Amino acid sequence: MLRAYRGVATIDDYLDHVIEQVAPPGPPSVPLSFSALDIPYAVGYLDAVWKNRTGSHLFVNLDPASVARLTQTCGSEEEFNSLMSALADVLGQVVTPGQSSPLQRGALEAVRDHLSAVLDADVAARVGAAIGALIRLRHVRVSTQHSDARHRAVAAFQEIGLAFPPVSWEEAWAHIAVVAKGALDVLREEVHAGLPQR
């Protein structure tokens, strides 16, 4: 037992060693995993809950081609850009109750502002963070598809926890798909719990 402390020379060394011995192991490192249908299902479930709570659809005029594209694999920068365009197309089709068509710009921001006005403050904060994540994904799409904005790609990727250029476009898309699904699921949960049923 004392042999384990043989190299300990200071109190800090001792504390580090004790903490190392008694601290629970960190969570195992698990690669990002998602199904090709995760985002379309998350969109569909959120839209169904939104309609149940507000009487109208959250997503309008969805392009079936964009939704279908979200189920495709990603193996290159070109495919990544195509998937990001499809995701941006889908996320750009949200409307607040009473609107029949999405805003040309700021559709997600309009939904965030609507919900922050009708939900309790703590719930609105969680919803705001989820929509903020989706807005950051939109920034990634813009930064990677405009050659004069490539310098912004570094910042946009860092905002969502990725390096630019990514080590793997497949892993970058997996990361984005997990972020998108997680944000859409948070919105569904909070809309279901926080808005009265119509």
Image (cartoon, grey):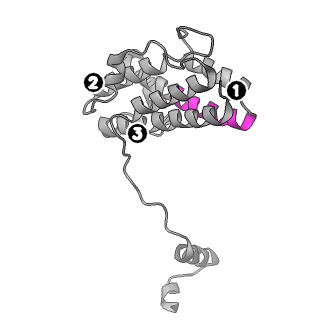
Residue at disc 3, secondary structure: helix
| Residue farthest to the bottom, as pictured | 2
The residue at which mark 2 appears reads as 78
Q: Nearer the viewer, residue 186 or 178?
A: 186
The residue lying at 37 percent from left, 21 percent from top is 86
Q: Nearer the viewer, residue 112 or 24?
A: 112
The residue at which mark 1 appears reads as 116
Q: CA distance from mark 3 to mark 2?
A: 17 Å
Whether residue 175 is visible, yes or no, is: yes
Q: Position of residue 30 (x, y in %)?
A: 39, 54
The residue lying at 47 percent from left, 60 percent from top is 27
In the rendered structure, which segment of residues is drawn in magenta?
Answer: 121-135
The residue at which mark 3 appears reads as 175
| Residue farthest to the front, as pictured | 198
Q: Crowding at label 2, few (<14), some or many (≥20) Cα neighbours within 10 Å?
A: few
Q: Position of residue 9 (x, y in %)?
A: 57, 81
Give yes or no for residue 33 being in the magenta stretch. Answer: no
Q: Position of residue 187 (x, y in %)?
A: 57, 32
Task: Say what amino acid the circle numbered 3 marks.
Answer: His
Q: Earlier in the sequence, mark 2 or mark 1?
A: 2
**Left or right for 184, reference 113:** left
Q: CA distance from mark 2 to mark 1?
A: 37 Å
Q: CA distance from mark 1 to mark 3?
A: 27 Å
